[in-house]
Amino acid sequence: MRRIMIAFLAALSVGATTLSGTAAGAQGSELDRQRLRQSLNAVHEAGMYGTYSHVAGGRESWKGAAGVADVDTRRPVHPGMVHRIGSITKTFAAVAVLQQVGRGTIELDAPVARYLPGLIPGERGQQITVRMLLNHTSHLSDYDHLIFRTVEDLDANRLRTWQPQELIDLALAAPATGQPGVTPGEYSNTNYIVAGLLLEKVTGVKAERYITDHVIRKAGLRHTSFPRTPHIPGPHSKAYEGLSGLIDPPRDYSVYDMSLAWTAGAIVSTMEDLNRFYRLLLRGDLIDAGLLAEMMRTVPLRAGASVSDYGLGIFPLDLPCGRFWGHEGGVIGMTTVSFSSPDGERRFSMGFNLTGYQRFDENGNPVPHPVDAAVWEHLLAAACGPSATATAKTAPPATPFQLDRIPIRR
């Protein structure tokens, strides 16, 4: 949903690749449990209300939590909390579409108009392919930016139920961000709303139902679902949004109608479920090797002021101990990061319950925040094990989570 971490993770990749080319293989090292605990505590101490993490390597696993789920009652967070995972939903949706590609009901390089005639009017409907939806090179405008224009928009849309066609119409009424297929791409939630309608057209069932039956249940995920109400099902934290100081103190937005995100970002899950999901995906248990290779074919994607690589619903993260694949997810009040080594052996997922804590200077550039440096250290400890200690102190992130914060008018 809200794209708030790709630029940050791209900055991690740049910093990491300039550090060391000799740390490959650290993915298989043991879990540094003391470092994981200390670094997660440091995220909370740096200003994050609450955070939880799950790390797995081979047959080992570690889980932890730090901070509070409710700033008023001081109820603590715990590792098994259900969490809005935002745009990590895109990986689930991409897997569902690729399953249909495997069955021959969808062709990746066929125009969207073949399956949804008239949905994207005119020549664009013939130019935009299914692949362009999944790798964000369609250049359809992002409806998300058109809905949130003032602070009041957050509350006005809190309990509104959106139909997919409404979201697409908003995007189509706005100028395209470029020519279909031209790179770098422009990340847009609209792409995955269209992909949801495409899935419904070829399967004859609701997209949520198909993804639940053929991706979530196939992966054996017990705490992952599309919520049926604005409430998060199961034990969960509150979700606090600060909008870079415009909401002070930050307010709870855990009750929110996620029809606004649908197949682009509405799923809830746990950190442990996410690690299981990416392990099975990258081991070829959800789609075959050929389709997984298509997922990993990347194109340049504009990420804030930088350009990063993006595949079909996943993107790579290069760290000193190797390359990882996964996604980030951000919604109002909650952020998630989930990545796995290519063999599915080393996985890490991390959730936060406060967004919009960063500040920006008069030129709109992000001001470094202690939370971001602490997150960097924890992610390195999770991914790279004991070898992360020196590296984490050498390469703090260049930018905080800021790919495209909600463009609220000041």
Image: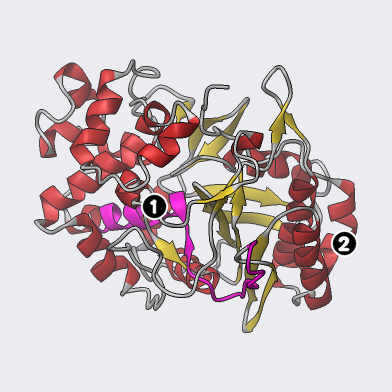
Question: Is 294 on the left or on the right of 203, as rendered?
Answer: right
User: Closest to the observer: 391 or 250?
Assistant: 250
**Mark 2, residues whose alpha carbon is within 10 Å: few (<14), some, or many (≥20)?**
some
In this view, the residue farthest toward the bottom is 59
Residue visible at 41% across and 56% down in the picture:
255
Q: Is residue 254 magenta?
A: no
Question: Residue 397 in the image: x percent, y percent?
Answer: 77, 42
Disc 1, SS:
loop
Residue 205 - label? none
Disc 2, SS:
helix
Q: Which residues are magenta?
A: 71-99
Name the residue tied to disc 2.
389
Residue visible at 26% across and 23% down in the picture:
172
Question: Is 379 on the left or on the right of 172, as rendered?
Answer: right
Question: Residue 123 in the image: x percent, y percent?
Answer: 18, 17
Q: How many marks?
A: 2
Residue visible at 89% across and 52% down in the picture:
393
In this view, the residue farthest toward the front is 72
User: Closest to the observer: 22 or 259?
Assistant: 259
